[in-house]
């Protein structure tokens, strides 16, 4: 279990450093604006590829089954996971899924970063719906092993800590607009601040 926790910490550190404005600024100086067109796509691919060993460890390390939810709750949880996945996709499209994936930057490069603050759709109810529904998806797993529990707890802690750092980054990026948005819109759960 220690290796699994350490692997999530290492993955989280690498992911966080690569997502930071400081890292991106240094990379922009090195690659230039033209090279940065490919950064978001590379970042996403790299994040997925480096998550594979973490998931592999969860699979191959000694494990024990904790529980299996019985029917009909089993199917209700699967339905909840399907809804969470659908809402995730909706949230991605509301923030421009092509830009999120890094494809828009390659197809139609811009000289300056023209990120926009999305405050409509799901984002009018909570600032981080992708985190909320991602967490719902993992925690609605109807079959839980010890390794999965450790992985889910570690990823939840990472997401909550990461949300704090992302909030700071968004405040620097969008300034007063984000401060007002933050004041009026809860972080993860609708109507809770």
Image (spheres, rainbow, N blue to C red):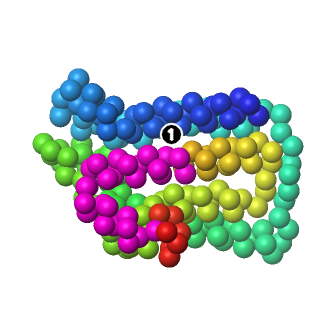
The residue nearer to you, when weighing 107 against 40, is 40
User: Which image quarter holds the N terminus?
Assistant: top right
Secondary structure mainly formed by the magenta segment: helix
Q: Which residue is mark 1?
A: 48
Give the image location of residue 48, x and y in percent. Answer: 50, 39
- Report the residue at 33% width, 52% height from top: 170
Query: What is the quadrant of residue 11 in the picture?
Result: top right
The answer to if 40 sits in the magenta stretch is: no
Q: Say left or right for 148 vs 37.
A: right
Q: Name, please, the residue furthest toward the left.
A: 111
Query: Is residue 110 visible to us here?
Result: yes
| Residue 46 location, quadrant | top left
* Residue extent of the magenta highlight: 160-186
Q: Secondary structure at mark 1?
A: helix
Crowd rating for badge 1 (residues with CA inside 10 Å; few <14, some 14–19, many 20+): few
Residue at the (51%, 33%) spot, across then down: 13
In the rendered view, tell whether residue 188 sits above or below residue 33: below
- Decide if residue 45 is in sight here: no
Left or right of 170 in this view: 165: right
* Rendered residue at 27%/27% (across/down): 26
Q: In screen coordinates, is 82 left or right of 90?
A: right
Residue 119 percent location from the top left of the image: 33, 68
Horizontal placement of 79 versus 134: left or right? right
Closest to the observer: 147 or 181?
A: 181
- Residue pushed farthest top? 30
Whether the magenta-drawn stretch holds residue 178 is answered as yes
Residue depicted at x 33% and y 67% = 181
Q: Nearer the viewer, residue 188 or 183?
A: 183
Q: Position of residue 78 (x, y in %)?
A: 69, 67
- Residue 58, image x, y percentages: 72, 38
Q: Place residue 59 in its image quadrant.
A: top right
């Amino acid at each position: 279990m220690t290796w699994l926790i350490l692997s999530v910490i290492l993955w989280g550190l690498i992911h966080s450093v690569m997502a930071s404005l400081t890292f991106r600024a240094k990379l922009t100086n090195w690659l230039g604006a033209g090279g940065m067109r490919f950064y978001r796509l590379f970042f996403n691919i790299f994040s997925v590829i480096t998550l594979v060993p973490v998931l592999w460890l969860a699979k191959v390390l000694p494990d024990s089954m904790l529980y299996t939810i019985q029917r009909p709750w089993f199917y209700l949880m699967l339905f909840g996971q399907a809804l969470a996945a659908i809402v995730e996709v909706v949230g991605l499209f509301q923030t421009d899924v092509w830009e999120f994936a890094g494809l828009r930057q390659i197809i139609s490069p811009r000289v300056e970063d023209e990120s926009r603050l999305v405050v409509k759709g799901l984002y009018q109810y909570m600032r981080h719906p992708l985190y909320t529904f991602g967490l719902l998806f993992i925690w609605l797993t109807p079959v839980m092993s010890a390794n999965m529990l450790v992985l889910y707890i570690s990823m939840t802690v990472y997401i909550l800590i990461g949300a704090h750092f992302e909030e700071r980054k968004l405040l620097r990026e969008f300034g007063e607009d984000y401060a007002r948005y933050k004041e009026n819109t809860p972080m993860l759960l609708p109507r809770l601040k």
